[in-house]
Structures are given as structure tokens and as C-alpha cells.
Image (cartoon, helix red, strand yellow):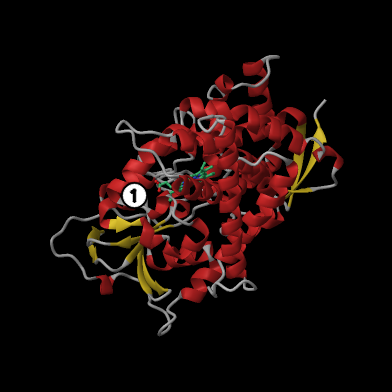
Amino acid sequence: MTAQAPQSSRSLKSPEEIPGSYGLPLIGETIELFRDEELFYWRHFHKYGSIFKTRAMGKNFAFLIGPEANRLVMMEQADHVSTTLGWEFLRPVFGNGLLFMEGEKHRATRRLMYPAFHGRAIASYFDTIQSVAQDFVQDWATRETVNLLTEFRRLTLVIACRLFIGTQTASEVGQTSQWFSQLVKGGLSILRLDIPWTPYGRSQHARQKLTEFMRSVIAERQRQGNLQESRDVLGLLLAAVDEDGNHLSESEVIDHALFMLVAGHETTSNLLSWLVYELGAHPEWQSRLRSEQDAILKDAPLDMTHLKQLSHLTNVLKEGERLYPPVYGMPRGVVKDIEYAGYRIPAGWYVDVSPMLTHRLPELYAEPDRFDPDRFAPPREEDKQHPFALVGFGSGPHGCLGFEFAQMEMRVILLTLLRQYSWTVTPERESIAPMRQPSKLMKNLQARFTLVN
Ligand code: HEM
């Protein structure tokens, strides 16, 4: 199966002619989409090719697969589509974060938030991340097995609570993590009644509790006169001012910080689980990364300047992003007609582009199901064939704001593990390859850690 290039012919075909099926009356293919998740994408791609339609949740969708589709939707015609409409079903969990803003308001808010996620700010989070990670993994060799997803969810949540919402003590982390889990679990429930005993009601209650907690942290900082403190994301968002003197209100800061918590938590822990799994299944890569670390650090403690010098590690991270993009599909509501591959997709429809399917196209990546980080090293550099060939963090106006943060966090955690441990994993890679449904498989990934020398 290959991806098609767009046509600019004037004789556009109607959306009704897009290959695919609307499924059953009323419900369309909603059940298949939610039940099978990634498999739905794979099956339809194999059956219909690089553009196909479906109907789910009462909406008409066109799935557009390949790097040109990514370019069109994420960048070239980003103003013809809406992320707010596309991600609407996640709004009870996500609240009013950046993904739910459009146009000038989105651009201005993103500009204000940018400094909290780049350069000096990222460096200022390094120590917290490193010390939390070291404490967290210190007893892993004493455990029979470690469930990767469970542990990385806990670890990234502790880090995010410390840096995004200002949690300090272990009991605060315990409480805020619990509220956070309730928020995510209930927010995704299909029945959305805001009544205390329903999962959805509990999730909205948890959001309220998290909001109150953050208000109290901000009030305490105000009382101590260190509101502008920039040790954490919360501090930097509170301090953010643009060239016209505009700043975010307290409730905007809280909304954005909570959105970061949600947007950054599952994505990072999912990808970390797969990275550690693949390294467990490829001990030769553990050795290469350990040797690279020894050669660059010598006996010095790890610091920010080392991270970008570790090119094998960079390639391993890219290979994880390629094979297991946590956001495997990106939906958008069409607000102005778009054209793709000779079809007209009208306003009122939805489009979905897929990092997961793009990343496994054989015309971009040789033997796409293989774990082969060297594909990113010169002279191969397979991702450089097309600027939208590797898009696990999105691109364009809504591309991931937390990219640098996530890259730094994942590098620090992997290096912390590599320095202390070697590990093996179950299940056997051969028994689950080619991993068409990572979101289902990842719950079972286990590792056994042994101290190195
Ligand atoms: C491995 C980790 C991560 C992955 C794979 C990832 C992926 C993505 C993707 C694909 C998008 C674009 C969604 C779309 O266009 O529909 C996105 C947006 C976003 N991500 Fe991440 N993300 C990760 C970690 C993080 C972290 C740690 C943070 C916060 C520190 C974060 C904050 C955001 C924000 C704020 C947006 C919305 C940007 C906007 O709408 O302007 N992400 N992310």
C-alpha cells in the first residue's frame, strides 16, 4: 500500500466517491473505531488505500494517509480545519488548553507560553527531572518484574505534578495524582452526566479539586512574594508577559497547566514504555547507548550539554516515535472545503491524518516494521526524504509545544536506567510483532532489571 500525492485537477470528485463505507445507519462505524482503535486504521488503509471515508459519532470522516496529507492538514491548509472540532470529544478531560484555541487568540497565547518550554526554562527543569527519576528507579533491580507502563505513568506524573502544578510533598503528589487519574478516567466515559456518583461527575469534581489546589499554590506564592519564581512551568506561566505587556490570567494559567498535565502525561509514558521495551529486546542497542554515554560523559555527572551530543540516543528516540507514535491519528473539523487526491472534502466533514500509518510506509522507511535506529543516521536519514515523514509530535500551528520538554525528560530517564541497569523484557518481540495495536499491547510490557557492574 502506498500513499498518493494530491492532484490539483479542477474536475474534483465528490466526497461520496471517496472509497470506504458509512457503516450502519445512525451509528456508522463508531463501534469498530472505538473497539479496534489502531486496527481500524490498518484494516481500512489496506482495504481502500490512502484516502478512505467512514461515519462515526454521527460525523463523516475522510482519512488522508501519507506525508503530503500531513503537510496539507497540519500546515498548508491548517486554516481550513479546526483542532477544537477535531478533538471536541476529549474536551471534558483536556479543558480549555491550546488545542482548543484557534486563530489569533491561539497564536498569541502560544507565543506567551513558548518561553516556558524552550531554552533556559527546559534547562531549569533538568535537575528536578533527574533527581525524581533517580529516586524512582532505585529499587528496580530488587523487583521480580516491572510493568513498564504502570511505572512510567507514575514517574511522569510525579514529574509533571512537581513542574506543572507546583506540587511539592509526597502526600500532595499522591493526592493530585489521584485527582488526575479520576479526571482522565471519567472524562472519557461515554455517559456524560455531571452527577457526583457517575465517573463523569467524579472527573469534573477532580478537575475542580485540582483547580482549587493550584489556586492555593498560587496564593501561597503570592503571600511569599515569589510569584515570578521560574523554577517550574507554573512559575513561568504566571510570569509570562508579551511585548505589549499582556499576561495570562490566573484561570488561564490553571487551564493551560492542567492541559499540559494531560497532554504530556500519557504520551510520554507510552513512548517511554515502548523505548525501554525495544531496548530490552535489542541488548546490542543497550550496549551501544551505554558506550556512547561513557564516551561523552567520561566520569562527569550528566548535564544538559551532554544530551544533544548523544546521537545514537537521538536515533533511538526517533525510532520509538516512528514505530509507536502515541497520538496515532489527528482529527480536524473541516471549516473550509479542502482538496486532496482529486477529491473535494467539504466544510462540515472531518479529516484525520495518521502519524502511525505514515511512519510505516515502505516508500519512506525500509522494512518499516523493523526496529532500526540507524535508519536516521547518515547516509540513510530516511526521515529527511520528506519534511512530513516523521510527525509523531505533529507540526504547523498546533505542533507539540512540549516537544523539547518531552525529549529532555525521556533522554534523562533512559540515561538514568542505562547507567545503572541492563534489562530483558517480556513478551518476546517476535510473539507480538509487527505491533499493529500498540495501545492494547503496551499494558503487558514487563522488564526485569539487573545492576550493571
Ligand atoms: C512523547 C511525548 C509527546 C508526544 C508524542 C506529543 C504529541 C503531540 C502531538 C501529536 C500534538 C499535536 C496534536 C494535533 O495537532 O492534533 C501535540 C500537541 C501539544 N502537546 Fe504534545 N506530545 C508529547 C508530550 C508533550 C508534553 C510533555 C507536553 C507539555 C509539556 C505537551 C504539550 C502539548 C501542547 C500544549 C500541545 C498543543 C499545542 C497547540 O495546540 O498549539 N506535549 N503533542
Determine the residue positioned at 52% across, 35% down: 235
Q: Is residue 169 left or right of residue 206?
A: right
Residue 57 image offset from top left, x and y in percent: 43, 74
Determine the residue positioned at 54% across, 75% down: 193
Q: Is residue 37 left or right of residue 277?
A: left
**Farthest residue, direction left:** 10
Determine the residue positioned at 65% across, 73% down: 197
Quadrant where the image shows the C terminus:
top right
- Kind of element beneath mark 1: helix
Residue 84 image offset from top left, x and y in percent: 37, 58
**Farthest residue, direction front:** 223
Quadrant where the image shows the N terminus:
bottom left
Q: Which residue is mark 1?
A: 74
Residue 422 image offset from top left, x and y in percent: 76, 34
Q: Could you classify mark 1 by the number of other residues whose Cα lies within 10 Å: few (under 14), some (14-19), or many (20 or more)?
A: many
Q: Is mark 1 within 8 Å of ligand 1?
A: yes
Q: Is residue 332 above or below residue 267?
A: below
Question: Disc 1 marks which amino acid?
Answer: Met
**Residue 373 visible, this angle:** no
